[in-house]
Image (spheres, rainbow, N blue to C red):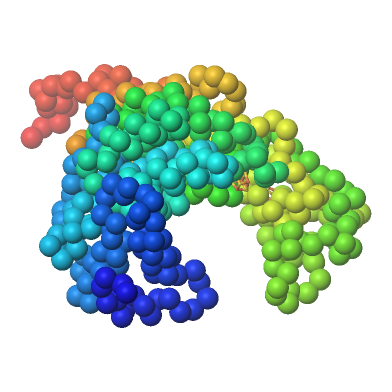
Amino acid sequence: MPKHETPLLDQLESGPWPSFVSEIKRQSEARHQKQNEVEYQIPVDVCDDVLGVLEMSYNDGTCHWKHGGIVGVFGYGGGVIGRYCDQPDKFPGVAHFHTVRVNQPAGKYYTTEYLRQLCDLWDFRGSGLTNMHGSTGDIVLLGTRTEQLEEIFGVLTHEMNQDLGGSGSNLRTPACCLGESRCEFACYDTQELCYQLTMEYQDELHRPAFPYKFKFKFDGCPNGCVASIARSDMSFIGTWRDEIRIDQEAVAAYIGGELKPNAGAHADGEWGPFDIQKEVIDLCPSQCMSLEDGKLVIDNKECVRCMHCINTMPRALRIGNDRGLSILVGAKAPILDGAQMSSLLVPFIKVEPPYDEIKEVIENVWDWWMEEGKNRERLGETIKRLSFQKLLEVTGIKPMPQHVQEPRHNPYIFWKEEEVPGGWQRDIKEFRKLHQR
Ligand code: HEM
Ligand code: HEM
Ligand code: SF4
Ligand code: SF4
């Protein structure tokens, strides 16, 4: 017998998609069945009360969590999102319902052994409910009480060699695409760079020292499988700077129909036989491809590495051998002054351990933003306020045409005083000698 009636939520148990309602109900039953075996450290009926308070929100169309919540573990300034129900008498199981962010492995590869250990801990000291994963990347343990936080942190660190993720005005948990682990498009080892920079900047991640949050994300190529250009203040996107490698036999096999375009991604539609002219050559954004005597030719100096031809004929076209990444900066959601995607800062940089060149760019940007950024101002907003020019100065990067999509059209151009013969100090009397009032 469920603790609360949930007629609205019950409707979400039908239909083909996995139902979060059915899953929470199953978890609730499991807790009740095992309550003699497991000495639950938070109320056994936490899942019933989650459904109860959610049903209430479905009924009245508003949220029933109190504002904010500041909890955590000693030594760190973030990692746990505190939360308290605004109906604690009705739903005592979720009076405290804090979320613990746990730093996930790069690429989110797991062993069942690790996951079982984590589930055992969370069954015992939490709600048993999770989010796999938060949009930043963390394993999200959803719902526990304040007294449990240090206990959980103790087991994570002492028994599982596992740290918390980030929250607050700091470096958040970095994330990457799965990169070279199983993608032929990967231009660098995204997982390794993600891991190494996460380790390098642990202090910045655990103890907020920034004007606002800051995120890293690592994409192995411009396809952007971790969406770094939209969801990280500093986006690392793999690329190459030599030639696309062409296997002409495989090109012929695509033309002849033996190989499926886009690895069969459109196989369930009626798109007719593959037409290399229509589907590749004519769609190349820089129009730098052609077919000559049945052979595919690419004018690589005009190629913008958009990935389209490689995506379409993965067996015939491969990324170049001279690989690295581009660094883009400033992506953020709309609050306060509008959404931004990242802007190109470093067109190409090699990815070589110990990544000193990459760290230099990061630290130059931080040195500037940590001093000049206003309270709760994202990097993208600081750049807007103080200018991209300033960003180039502090990173020691020379302005180049690749920094802009197009040049400015307004003539409100600032000059440095030293660039202008005679400087700014002028005497009106000198002017009057030539020009009467
Ligand atoms: C109580 C819970 C949360 C609150 C109040 C919250 C609040 C915010 C705020 C204020 C922003 C910034 C918007 C801006 O700068 O324009 C943001 C962005 C974002 N948050 Fe959260 N957040 C919460 C939970 C989470 C969780 C659990 C994750 C994933 C682990 C997450 C991932 C993100 C992402 C990916 C963005 C967008 C990218 C960005 O601009 O930084 N948030 N959130
Ligand atoms: C030979 C005659 C004139 C010349 C050479 C001249 C030149 C200029 C120039 C160079 C500017 C731009 C200043 C800047 O953007 O810093 C300007 C702005 C302006 N001028 Fe003239 N102008 C002349 C006559 C006039 C007249 C007769 C009027 C009005 C009756 C006028 C009204 C304005 C206004 C309203 C602005 C805009 C001010 C602003 O945007 O802040 N000008 N003029
Ligand atoms: S971003 Fe590129 S390298 Fe990474 S998984 Fe996607 S296609 Fe592969
Ligand atoms: S990667 Fe893009 S720009 Fe370069 S040749 Fe292929 S389709 Fe054209």
Residue drawn at x 38%, y 23% is 364
| Residue situated in front as seen by the camera: 171 or 132 | 132
Quadrant into which the N terminus falls: bottom left
**Looking at the image, is 205 positioned above or below residue 61?**
above
> In the rendered image, is residue 316 in sight?
yes
Q: Quadrant of residue 373?
A: top left
Residue drawn at x 15%, y 66% is 90
Residue drawn at x 65%, y 38% is 180
Left or right: 243 with respect to 50?
A: right
Q: Quadrant of residue 111?
A: top right
Residue drawn at x 34%, y 55% is 35
| Residue situated in front as seen by the camera: 219 or 338 | 219
> In the rendered image, is residue 402 in sight?
no
**Looking at the image, is 217 positioned above or below residue 278?**
above
Tell me residue 240's x, y (percent): 65, 36
Tell me residue 376's x, y (percent): 22, 40
Tell me residue 189's x, y (percent): 61, 33
